[in-house]
Image (cartoon, rainbow, N blue to C red):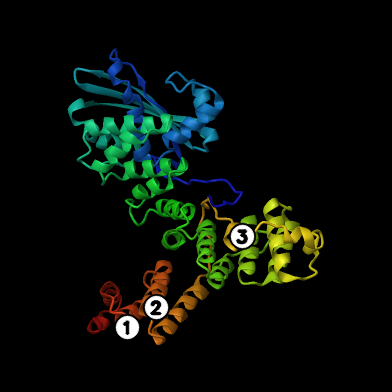
Amino acid sequence: MKKASSFAILLFFTASLLQAQGKTVVFPFENRSADSTVEWLGYGLEALFEDSLNGVPLAERLDIVDSMDVPDTGNLTLATRIIIAQKLKADNLLTGSFKVSENKILIEFTRYEIDKLTQKTGKCTVEMAGFPANLAPFIREEIGGKYPYPQTFTGHRFEAYVRGMLRAVVNSDFKEIAELAGKVTENESLNRNLGNLLFDTGHFEMALVYLKRLPETDSHGLFLSGMCCVQLENYADGLIFFLQTLKFRRNTASVVNVAGCLVALQHPVEAAAFLDSLPGDSGKTEPVVIFDRAVVDAGQKKWGDALNTLSSYISSFRITGEAKLLARFCCEKCNCTHPLCTDETEEKRKNQEKADIVSFYQFSNGEQGTNAALDLKEIKELYMAKAVQALKSGSKKEAIDALQKVLYLDPLQKDALKMLCEQCKDEKACRKLNALLPEAATLQ
């Protein structure tokens, strides 16, 4: 398994409520019916509202509950629920109850805005026959969310979804939920939740199946798909996923991981260009970025530069086991008198375990919450130059690959579109170019 950076996994979900925006945690709804066979609805309503609001996933909430050693029931006090919500860094919590009688469901809810200590209550009654789709107006008007499922997602399938997710989360039994996902391929929430859960439990190949079903605009899904590829050592596909992520969120983590894939694919010069696109001096830069710059220098056999960068990392942060190993690797190669090379004897260096550059690189598991002002101009120019050179040497495939990378970073880059259209006869590029430049219609 590939190493990840030390900063924590940060999953940034945004949810819209009626008069507030923020991260929402939903708790199971209390069953006030005499019928115990509808107990699953408590978690069903939790799942429905979570999916409607892009809320904190059930698995994350249960992890916090387990860590606090409290039962996962509807009997938690409001104070305990607030503590759980605060641990999950949520801005809102949603809770409530339901009652089933005469083929109808009476639902009551309370939403708390934690920092403001305000609350909103509401209720509705819907027929069992049309559930859960008949809750769409209530979700939109009262909960402030968007109904998340296709119209073909019947009550029977919804129940199978809830029960399957509970089995997967609690017992790591994915059989039922995977069977349902095989029948219902167009359910975005199901694919997202299953993909996330499989990723979190280390089932990377399976997770990739469901993450690939998410919309191309889903930056978090693209990022996790890239991380699956890193864990599976499929760096070529991982590179594409991280480049696609940069279309929507120019975050440090994606840039770091693009560079890592390029290192693994033996393109250290391109990797260095991506890391150099990150703003800020070393005092403001994430530790992983400085460390990985040293790795990339080593990948270019710039042993002195790598050791100097590593010295900056150590002086700014601390000496780590990874830093010691990288220093030894560089010292063995450079045959120099750098200060980092004076602690090891020649005999010890010769006995070091054989390692390659990729084994040192620290991929980032964390997604930054805000977009950085990245300067990608040099990178696009680098790929454009590679495309020109490839076409001159007659390698159309290599040229197309370089031009596609330009378009991952800038989908409307006219020069790249023009080269793909005119010289590579790419019909899709021609159509996009014609939309940008109507006068170019004759190029097709």
Amino acid type, label 1: Gln
Element carrying mark 3: helix
Disc 2 crowd, CA 10 A, few/some/many (<14, 14-19, 20+): many
Discs 2, 1 touching: Cβ within 8 Å: yes
Is 398 in front, or is 196? 398
Q: Which mark is residue 423?
A: 1
Direction from residue 305 to residue 416 in the image, left or right: left
Q: Which mark is residue 399?
A: 2
Amino acid type, label 3: Val
Element carrying mark 1: loop
For the residues labelled 2 and 1, the Cα–Cα distance comes to 10 Å
Disc 3 crowd, CA 10 A, few/some/many (<14, 14-19, 20+): many
* Residue under label 3: 289
Residue 367 position within the rendered picture, expressed as x and y whole percent measured from the top left: 51, 52
**Residue 17 vertical placement versus 162 (above, below):** below
Q: Residue at x 48, y 55 (%)?
A: 230
